[in-house]
Amino acid sequence: MHAFDVLGDPVRRRILELLADGELTAGAIGAEVQAEFGISQPAVSQHLKVLRDNGFTNVRAEGQRRLYSVDSAPLRDIDQWLDTFRRFWTPHLDALATEIARGKRQRRIEGKHHD
């Protein structure tokens, strides 16, 4: 399965968002995702399997629990692919940052004149 097919599903994206803060048990992931998306535990397990089989997550056993974490390798591959297109939005973001800084500087100057 292609990386964008894996990430095209909102449930799988949400699971990765949850794991971005650190390792979680399958139960904790399931409880959160079931509550947010209204899907069954077996459906959550299928999404975890897709993520695991496609290299987006690692899983380790700790007693009866299964702990999931993000594997960043596929995300780096996506980032490299996106790098081809960054030129389309980076100048706009740089220009926005410049305008924000200019506005802050102007407010500071105006604030000093009012003192």
Image (cartoon, grey):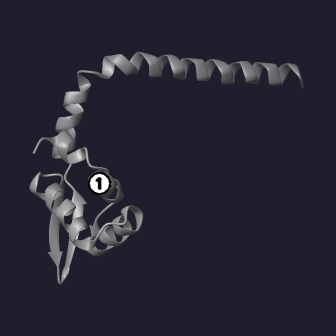
x, y percentage for residue 75?
A: 22, 42
Residue shown at 72% from the left, 18% from the top: 106
Above/below status of 97 relative to 18? above
User: Which quarter of the picture shows residue 65?
Assistant: bottom left
Q: Is residue 100 left or right of residue 68?
A: right
> In the image shown, does 39 or 61 lie closer to the viewer?
39
x, y percentage for residue 23?
A: 28, 65
Residue shown at 74% from the left, 23% from the top: 107
> In the image shown, does 69 or 110 lie closer to the viewer?
69
Q: Residue type at mark 1: give it.
A: Leu
User: Which quarter of the picture shows residue 18?
Assistant: bottom left
The residue labelled by disc 1 is 16
Q: Is residue 56 left or right of residue 85?
A: left
Residue shown at 9% from the left, 56% from the top: 53
Quadrant of the drawing holding the C terminus: top right
x, y percentage for residue 44?
A: 25, 66
x, y percentage for residue 101?
A: 60, 22
Disc 1 secondary structure class:
helix
Question: Crowdedness of circle 1 by 10 Å Cα count: few (<14), some, many (20+)?
Answer: many
Tally of marks: 1
Among all residues in the image, which is located at the extreme right? Answer: 115
Quadrant of the drawing holding the N terminus: top left
Above/below status of 43 relative to 14? below
